[in-house]
Image: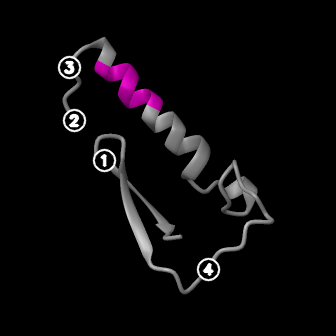
Amino acid sequence: MLVHGERHLRQVLAEYERHYNQHRPHQALSLRQPIHDPAEVVDLTARIQRRSAVCGLIHEYRRAA
């Protein structure tokens, strides 16, 4: 990835921070996301959606609603 100035760098770092704190599973939390609602029911038969994060360097996967 080429960073094109300070503004672009701040954007990339903010997106990585969001991924790290909201989506990425953490071992200390039994592989759950830091922002996790245990009351939320996950439909295991729903299709899986992929979303690119951090300028396409990381892919997040979630069940489609």
Give the secondary structure at mark 2. Answer: loop
The kind of residue on which mark 4 rests is Asp
* N-term-proximal mark, 4 vs 2: 2
**Pick the front one: 31 or 22:** 22
Give neighbour class at mark 2: few <14, some 14-19, many 20+ (Cα, 10 Å).
Answer: few
What residue is shown with label 2?
Answer: 1
Contact between labelled residues 2 and 4, with CB atoms less than 8 Å apart: no
Q: Per the image, is 52 magenta?
A: no
Which stretch is magenta? 8-14
Note whether 6 is above or below 52 in the view shown. above
Residue 44 placement: quadrant: bottom right
The kind of residue on which mark 3 rests is His
Provide the major secondary structure of the magenta segment.
helix
Give the secondary structure at mark 4. Answer: loop
Contact between labelled residues 3 and 2, with CB atoms less than 8 Å apart: no
Residue lying furthest bottom: 45
Q: x, y percentage for residue 25?
A: 60, 57
Q: x, y percentage for residue 51?
A: 38, 57
| Residue found at x 71% / y 73% | 41
Q: x, y percentage for residue 7?
A: 32, 15
Q: Per the image, is 9 magenta?
A: yes
* N-term-proximal mark, 1 vs 3: 3
Q: x, y percentage for residue 24?
A: 55, 52
Residue lying furthest right: 39
What residue is shown with label 3?
Answer: 4
Residue 32 placement: quadrant: bottom right
Note whether 33 is above or below 45 in the view shown. above
What residue is shown with label 1?
Answer: 57
**Quarter containing the N terminus:** top left
